[in-house]
Amino acid sequence: MIHEVDEVLKGLLEGGALAGSGIEVSLDAPTRDWAARRNAPAVNAYLYDIREEVSRRERGTVAVTDGRGQVVRRRQPPRWFRLSYLVTAWTKRPQDEHRLLSAVLATLLPREILPPSELPGALGALGLSVPLTVSGSQTESRSLAEIWSALGGELKPSLDLVVIAPFPAFPEYDAGPPVTEGATVRVRAVDGTPDGSPGRSHRPHQIEREKRKR
């Protein structure tokens, strides 16, 4: 799931306002060594934090239907995870970096919701839309200064990009076939022998209605 989000994010950055510019989009950690190897402008989107979005956790099961609307399988609801990316621009001049960050904002701001049709693989198969937030309120426990310190680099302008993506919790399992026949009631004598009368077939709702009459 995480690598599929990486794929979507990289495609968005390469195909938006930066399309045709030749700007490299990298997902590597922007360490001091990585920065020293840059010899061309680049945009970096580094995944620095992964944690579950507990407020979206659901209980119970989800029904999987076939083309006729019959329930054929069941599965646990997906678990949602918050993927936080540190997006930075790398050039020789701060003004150029600011222009690249502006281009990234112009690309991502209109894409607050990613529909299933634009999601690859297992992520798209879930049929769920994925929300995307740029430079919102930071809720992670680590500050950006701490992140840059851990990377061994100096603090620089960045965008905080958050993608909340679903992850299949458990595999699907087959459901029982739908009920197509009603229940049959047979009467026996006190000694347990059949009274010879034919059984009466009832639909479940008919049985419930006769109980109420009694």
Image (cartoon, rainbow, N blue to C red):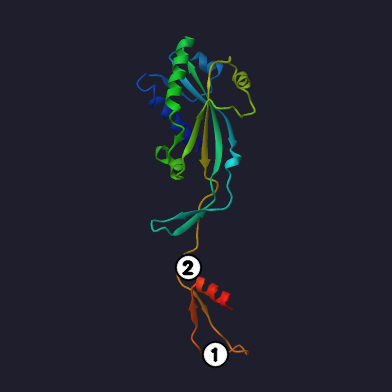
| Left or right relative to 156: residue 177 | left
Q: Where is residue 128 in the image (x, y as percent from the top left)?
A: 47, 43
User: Quick one: SS at disc 2?
Assistant: loop
Q: Where is residue 64 in the image (x, y as percent from the top left)?
A: 47, 54
| Amino acid type, residue under disc 1 in the picture | Asp
Residue at 51% of width from left, 90% of height from top? 196
Residue at 55% of width from left, 88% of height from top? 194
Q: How far is the residue under mark 2 from the one under mark 1?
A: 28 Å
User: Quick one: SS at disc 1?
Assistant: loop
| Left or right relative to 32: residue 72 | left
Badge 2 density bin: few <14, some 14–19, many ≥20, Cα 10 Å = few
The label number, if any, that marks residue 179 in the structure image: 2
| Amino acid type, residue under disc 2 in the picture | Val
The label number, if any, that marks residue 195 in the structure image: 1
Q: Where is residue 10 in the image (x, y as percent from the top left)?
A: 44, 28
Question: Where 186 falls versus 87 (above or below)?
Answer: below
Query: Which residue is more in the foreground, 28 or 18?
Result: 18
Which image quarter: residue 141? top right
Residue at 63% of width from left, 21% of height from top? 146
Q: Quadrant of the C terminus?
A: bottom right
Badge 1 density bin: few <14, some 14–19, many ≥20, Cα 10 Å = few
| Left or right relative to 63: residue 150 | right
Q: Where is residue 21 in the image (x, y as percent from the top left)?
A: 37, 18
Quick check: can you spot residue 3? no
Residue at 57% of width from left, 87% of height from top? 188
Quick check: can you spot residue 183? yes
